[in-house]
Image (tube, grey):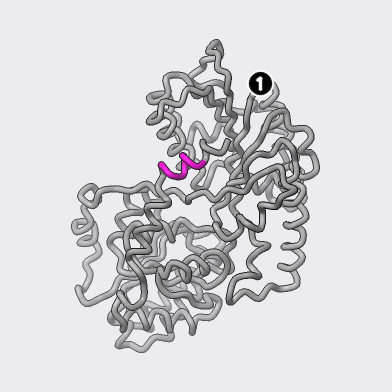
Amino acid sequence: MYINSSSSKKSDKKLIIWNLVLTGHYSNYLQYLIEYLSKNNIQDQIYVIVCKEFIDQHKEVVSLASKLLNNKLEFITIKPEEKAILKSTQSKIGRFVRDFQEFRLFCRYAKSLSATHGLMMIADRYLLPIALEGYKLPCPLSGIYYRPSFHYSQFSHYQPTSKERIQHLREKIILSRVMRQSKVKSLFVLDPFVVNDLNHNLNCATAVYMPDPVKTYNLSELDIKKFTQTFDLDIQQKKFLLLGSLGERRGIYQLLDAISLLPDNLCQKLCLILVGQIIPNDQETVKAKITQVSQTKSVKIICNFEFVSEQDVHRYFHGADVILSPHQKHIGMSGTLVLAAAAQKPVLSSNYGLMGKLVQHYNFGLTVDSTKPEEIAQGLTRFLQEPETVLCDHSQMKKFAEQNSADEFARVIFNHI
């Protein structure tokens, strides 16, 4: 299926953007790339390969392309019969097989469209296929790699388990083959601390640090005061925000247990704001835990378990006093840090992996072992009792937010493909 068909238009450069994923921030990334293309009058022919469901669920991105790019960009959906043979991702073996199926499908589309370059919006899934079958690539390829972790042993507070050591070894072996593939050009990473480890003299490919893009709004557009008035808050209460998919991996259980450990005089000063859809398997447990804490502690808990718009996400971040990020052993980057930096709000974060390293490196706030409620409670206590200026560096936040603009993200991508 073709959107904005312009097959007759000739162009020396033809870029394929490959994105068969429906959820996550990939649609936003596509939007930023499209806006950059239009703003900078880039004339290359671009094909975005997606599933039909993407067209249905992200009409605003497709519409934006038709308005801005004068038929230089086409959305192409894979055929129903191609989608039908893809294995289910419900099992490990299914995911393994599907990754190879999708990689081979990419190669077929790149060849049939005479692509001069390919960009995978999420390369993580295709690293093993590229390592083993990279010789099949019909054109040069770049991709975004979100979850490198083999270098975490260089970070403080990191003590790998035997399972993690095996995973790191596997990761190194696969990446060494990927980076030596002659058709692989750039591997974009959101982790600035892994670039040197990936860039060896024998490599054909280059690892490139890529900003994690966040769109910014003028405060006047957001109307923060009116927005926060809906919370009916005591002016003495400090607002702690946890926003995202609420479940075990987000650390919501450890957070609620931590609040249960606080004395009543501190609970009265704390307002917990929970925003985001609850993971289906955690629905009953999360709600029961919130009810229990609300009944046993004198703390105010505000819940919004609905999907929130991008503008409302920014409103919540600007309206909060402290941003919570008690992820449980999260690998890779989190947009939470960039949103917090853009809003100039300190973070109480897990000390694990890249997130912990960034918070410590840029002095965004406090890091704790988020698997331990007592450590989270200590962090909450410090934010309730100590001045914000002692706990974070606003100038570093501002600098970090500027580095992670949507324009800078797109500029890096197009300068390295």
Q: Residue at x 42, y 80 (%)?
A: 379
Asked if residue 401 can be seen in this view, the reply is yes
Q: Position of residue 262 (x, y in %)?
A: 39, 86
Task: Describe residue 383's horizontal placement relative to residue 288 as left or right.
Answer: left
Image height of 260 relative to 98, above or below: below
Considering the numbered disc 1 on the image, is that residue within a helix, a strand or a loop? loop
Q: Residue at x 19, y 56 (%)?
A: 226
- In the picture of the structure, the residue carrying the numbered disc 1 is 114
Asked whether 104 or 98 is in front, the reply is: 104
Asked whether 140 or 74 is in front, the reply is: 140
Which quadrant, please, contains the N terminus? Answer: top right
Q: Is residue 411 magenta?
A: yes
Residue 99 lies in what quarter of the image?
A: top right
Residue 153 lies in what quarter of the image?
A: bottom right
Give the residue furthest to the top: 8
Q: Position of residue 206 (x, y in %)?
A: 64, 45
Overall secondary structure of the magenta section: helix
Q: Position of residue 143 (x, y in %)?
A: 61, 42
In the image, which residues are magenta? 407-412
Task: Describe residue 191's horizontal placement relative to residue 314 as left or right.
Answer: right
Which quadrant, please, contains the C terminus? Answer: top right
Q: Tell me the crowding category of disc 1: few under 14, some 14 to 19, or many 20 or more residues within 10 angstroms, Cα based.
A: some
Image height of 165 relative to 81, above or below: below
Q: Residue at x 53, y 22 (%)?
A: 45
Q: Amino acid at mark 1?
A: Ser
Image height of 147 relative to 360, above or below: above
Residue 295 lies in what quarter of the image?
A: bottom left
Q: Position of residue 134 (x, y in %)?
A: 76, 38
Task: Describe residue 224's horizontal placement relative to residue 241 as left or right.
Answer: left
